[in-house]
């Protein structure tokens, strides 16, 4: 059984630079949306996210949303503004959506990573699909259930393989 241990951890997505991604042999980043790229209920990306996406694209790194959100307006809205593809209702930690994106881009798992804020969905899905993971701190705790979930993830967060500064 593969453990949900993140390969990289950082405070937010902007700490994941094109140099780090390319230097790790990664050319496709699959992105979680909620609490990773934007807080829940936000409908437009922040300016720093717009710059980060632009920098990744300019460096030749492909981006694609893989979100468990079932709200089509939210995922499609962000994907449209950022001009990247998406899969909604991905059912992570299942791997079907990740494998579809990798196949669509013609990439092996070694060339891919998933960026997300949760161990038991994002990191575990990446691990099960054979790709690497970037774990970011959740942007905002919106309810006690999420806080408890993040608390239960603490041991796996501590086991991360590398911390980005």
Image (tube, rainbow, N blue to C red):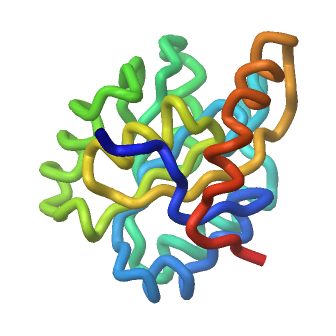
Q: Position of residue 54 (x, y in %)?
A: 59, 69
Name the quadrant containing residue 138: top right
Q: Is any part of residue 142 visible from this angle?
A: yes
Q: Is residue 13 above or below residue 98?
A: below
Q: Is residue 150 above or below residue 108?
A: above
82 relative to 24 in the view: left or right:
right
Q: Quadrant of the C terminus?
A: bottom right
Q: Position of residue 118 (x, y in %)?
A: 61, 36
Q: Is residue 65 above or below residue 42?
A: below
Q: Nearer the viewer, residue 111 or 45?
A: 111
Q: Quadrant of the N terminus?
A: top left
Q: Is any part of residue 53 visible from this angle?
A: no
Q: Nearer the viewer, residue 17 or 146?
A: 146
Q: Is residue 139 above or below residue 42?
A: below
Q: Nearer the viewer, residue 19 or 56?
A: 19
Q: Position of residue 147 (x, y in %)?
A: 83, 22
Name the quadrant containing residue 19: bottom right
**Residue displayed at 26% across by 46% down:** 129
**Residue displayed at 22% across by 31% down:** 96
Q: Number of callouts in the render?
A: 0
**Residue displayed at 75% across by 57% down:** 12
Q: Position of residue 88 (x, y in %)?
A: 41, 24
**Residue displayed at 71% across by 22% down:** 149
């Amino acid at each position: 059984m593969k453990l949900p241990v993140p390969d990289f951890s950082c405070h937010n997505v902007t700490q994941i630079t094109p140099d780090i991604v390319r230097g790790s042999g990664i050319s496709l980043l699959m992105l979680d949306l909620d609490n990773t790229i934007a807080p829940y209920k936000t409908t437009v990306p922040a300016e720093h996210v717009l710059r980060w996406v632009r920098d990744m694209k300019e460096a030749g790194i492909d981006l694609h949303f893989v979100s468990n959100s079932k709200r089509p307006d939210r995922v499609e809205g962000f994907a449209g503004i950022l001009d990247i593809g998406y899969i909604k209702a991905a059912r992570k930690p299942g791997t079907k959506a990740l494998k579809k994106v990798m196949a669509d881009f013609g990439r092996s798992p070694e060339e891919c990573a998933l960026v997300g804020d949760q161990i038991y969905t994002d990191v575990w899905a990446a691990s099960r699909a054979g790709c690497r993971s970037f774990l970011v701190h959740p942007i905002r705790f919106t309810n006690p259930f999420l806080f408890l979930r993040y608390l239960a993830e603490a041991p796996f967060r501590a086991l991360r393989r590398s911390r980005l500064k």
